[in-house]
Image (tube, rainbow, N blue to C red):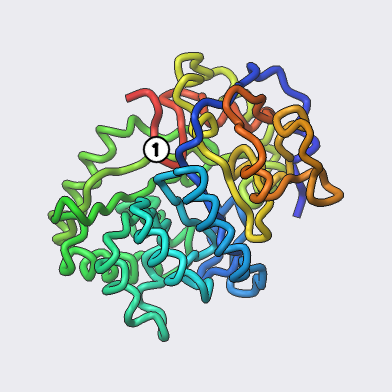
């Protein structure tokens, strides 16, 4: 698979500085029951990388010591990590809001029959991937049969109160099925709600539109089709400076399955470390220059530089993009 990393790091993107840290986004591993074409972490059923218990305990310690009140769990399928339920249960005891970035189909996998009730019991916020309300588009991105399973899982979630009761938020994620920007988020949310309600009787709270990043699988597809330069021109020509103030990286630290920390999930996959000056005096934990989660205990990141590249234009193009959806609302 061709890599876009070397094409992205020489950039004219504006410099960024960190604000208050209030979200810890933790990748629990690359193991997943699906293998989606837009997946920027190259997750799949054959991946073996999983966060161990010692690192999970360190996550909990950092949450408590740094008073971080949002834990955003991602993967892969984060639920496939054997320590997922322990982490969620202990984090909720601390009063932390836990977000589970769920692919929906995991709720129907053999061996995960008790997962849904566990999520309900711990009032876990679910952000679920459903890149379209069209079966055809979802099948192209996520595989044949995934759409039907996703709808079945959404009905199960609704039956438990998700998307209906205020304490059980259910948000969906849209990714474009190609090299174009997402439509306007609010109007697309209205379309999703109308179609899912009328066709399947499914309810949800919000739709989050996320721009495809020119990295990993999607980046390789762009290169293979000769569309990389055209897509980067699209992102850069739609740059909106107003989105700089609400970028997710300003308030978030991304943690990989080994406990190394990055400015965002995309930098994690590109192996772009936090700038050395941001952790001045703290020795990097490995030869790549990456720092570890334990380093957060020694350093206040407020006001420190954020590592940038041309992929950052994906977060500032048009209405903007983040793991929480559009920025320009």
| Horizontal and vertical percent position of residue 120 | 25, 67
The quadrant of the picture occupied by the N terminus is: bottom right
12 lies left or right of 170:
right
Q: Which residue is mark 1?
A: 325
Question: 19 or 299: which is nearer to us?
Answer: 299
* Residue neighbourhood size for the residue with mark 1, other residues' Cα within 10 Å, grouped as few (<14), some (14–19), many (≥20): many
**Whole-percent x, y for residue 25 in the image:** 51, 48
The image quadrant that residue 129 belongs to is bottom left
Q: Residue sitting at 45 percent across and 38 percent down?
A: 22
Residue at image position (38%, 48%) is 173
At a point 54% along the width and 60% down the height, the residue shown is 75
Note whether 239 is above or below 321 in the view shown: above
Residue 252 seen anywhere in this rendered image of the structure = yes
Q: Position of residue 89 (x, y in %)?
A: 38, 67
Snapshot quadrant of residue 10 = top right
- Relative vertical location of residue 250 with respect to residue 284 in this rendering, above or below: above
- Of residues 228 and 303, which is closer to you in this image? 303
Image-based side of 200 in relation to 84, left or right: left
């Amino acid at each position: 698979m061709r890599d876009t990393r070397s094409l992205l790091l020489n950039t004219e993107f504006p410099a960024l500085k960190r604000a208050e840290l209030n979200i810890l986004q933790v990748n629990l591993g690359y193991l997943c029951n699906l293998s989606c074409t837009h997946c920027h972490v190259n997750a799949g059923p054959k991946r073996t990388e999983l966060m161990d218990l010692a690192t999970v305990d360190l996550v909990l310690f950092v949450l408590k010591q740094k008073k971080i009140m949002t834990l955003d769990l991602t993967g892969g399928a984060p639920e496939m990590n054997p320590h997922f339920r322990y982490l969620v249960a202990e984090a909720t005891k601390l009063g932390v809001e836990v977000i589970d970035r769920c692919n929906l189909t995991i709720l129907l996998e053999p061996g995960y029959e008790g997962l849904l009730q566990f999520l309900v019991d711990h009032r876990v916020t679910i952000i679920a991937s459903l890149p379209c309300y069209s079966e055809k588009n979802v099948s192209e991105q996520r595989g044949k049969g995934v759409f039907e399973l996703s709808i079945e899982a959404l009905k199960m979630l609704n039956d438990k109160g998700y998307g209906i009761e205020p304490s059980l938020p259910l948000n969906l994620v849209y990714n474009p099925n190609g090299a174009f920007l997402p439509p306007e988020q609010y109007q697309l949310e209205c379309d999703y709600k109308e179609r899912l309600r009328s066709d399947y009787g499914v309810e949800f709270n919000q739709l989050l539109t996320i721009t495809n990043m020119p990295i990993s699988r999607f980046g390789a597809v762009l290169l293979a089709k000769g569309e990389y330069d055209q897509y980067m021109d699209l992102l850069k020509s739609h740059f909106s400076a107003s989105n700089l103030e609400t970028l997710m990286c300003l308030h978030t630290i991304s943690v990989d399955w080994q406990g190394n920390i990055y400015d965002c999930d995309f930098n994690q996959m590109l192996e772009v470390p936090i700038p050395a000056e941001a952790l001045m005096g703290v020795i990097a934990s490995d030869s790549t220059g990456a720092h570890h989660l334990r380093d957060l205990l020694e350093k206040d990141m407020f006001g420190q530089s954020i590592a940038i590249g041309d992929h950052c234009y994906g977060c500032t193009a048009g209405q903007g993009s983040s793991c929480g959806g559009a920025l320009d609302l």
